[in-house]
Image (cartoon, rainbow, N blue to C red):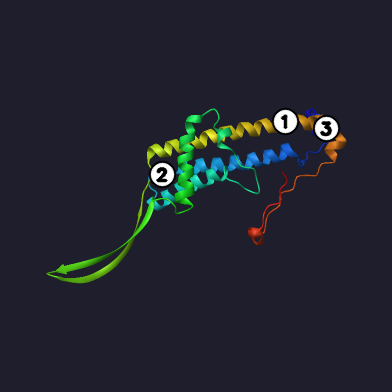
Amino acid sequence: MDKQEENSPSATKKLLQLSGPKARTLEEFSLHSHDLTASLQLLEALNNKALSSEVRKGLWYHAITIFYKCFKHSDARRRLWPQVVFAKRPDLMPAYNFFLNLRDRHIVHDDNPYIKAYVGVYVHKENDAYTVEDVISSVAIFDILDENRWRIFCELANYAIQWAEKEKTRLKNLLKAECEKKSPQELDSLKELAITIPTLNQVSEKKEVEF
């Protein structure tokens, strides 16, 4: 279509809804890419040295949680498989497994010894007599956020993003080629893409998806 035709009164531009297995897979990779990119942005935010230790811990924990959201089972989208994503970088798998255990057994669940609570009693002994002064309860946390682990996790996130973006590009090219082969009648039969906004009442509902 040349410029004159594009600007003619009869020329229109529409955004049409695509469906089918390839479109659904592209939707999934778009969601994964979004989450992986968000994870990396949270990691980059940790460069701000002015942040308090609790804010830094929150960013760190959320970066790990949202990264592994892509590799966990979901009824709404198919998961990424680390054996596929890191097939060309098997050297990253030990780090992947370490942070997966950190997510599963420490951040999300309290299963490993990285956080413990202790209860004790302060006593004052004089001769053979004890005076109980106070009972204390305290929490000890093993902090594993350091520059080395931060760099390793950044490398994981960066590589996963690059892999997901390549898959997105591949699928977009396939869909574009298929659409270019469709007749005007077939394109006219497609619905216009509509973005729906959920309500607050839908917080407990599952998304309707087709695999």
Q: State the CA–CA distance, disc 3 to disc 2.
A: 51 Å
Q: Nearer the viewer, mark 1 or mark 2?
A: 1
Q: Amino acid at mark 3?
A: Lys
Q: Amino acid at mark 1?
A: Leu
Q: Determine the residue located farthest toward the right in the rendered image.
A: 185
**Disc 1 designates what residue?**
174
Q: Secondary structure at mark 2?
A: loop
Q: Amino acid at mark 2?
A: Asn
In which quadrant of the rendered view does residue 187 lie?
top right
Residue pictured at 78% horizontal, 29% vertical: 3
**Disc 3 designates what residue?**
182
**Disc 2 designates what residue?**
48
Does the CB distance between marks 3 and 2 fall below 8 Å?
Answer: no
Is 59 positioned to the left or the right of 73 in the image? left
Neighbourhood count class around disc 2 (C-alpha, 10 Å): few under 14, some 14–19, many 20 upward: few
Please say whether residue 136 is visible from this viewpoint. yes
Q: Determine the residue located farthest toward the left in the rendered image.
A: 127
Q: Secondary structure at mark 3?
A: loop
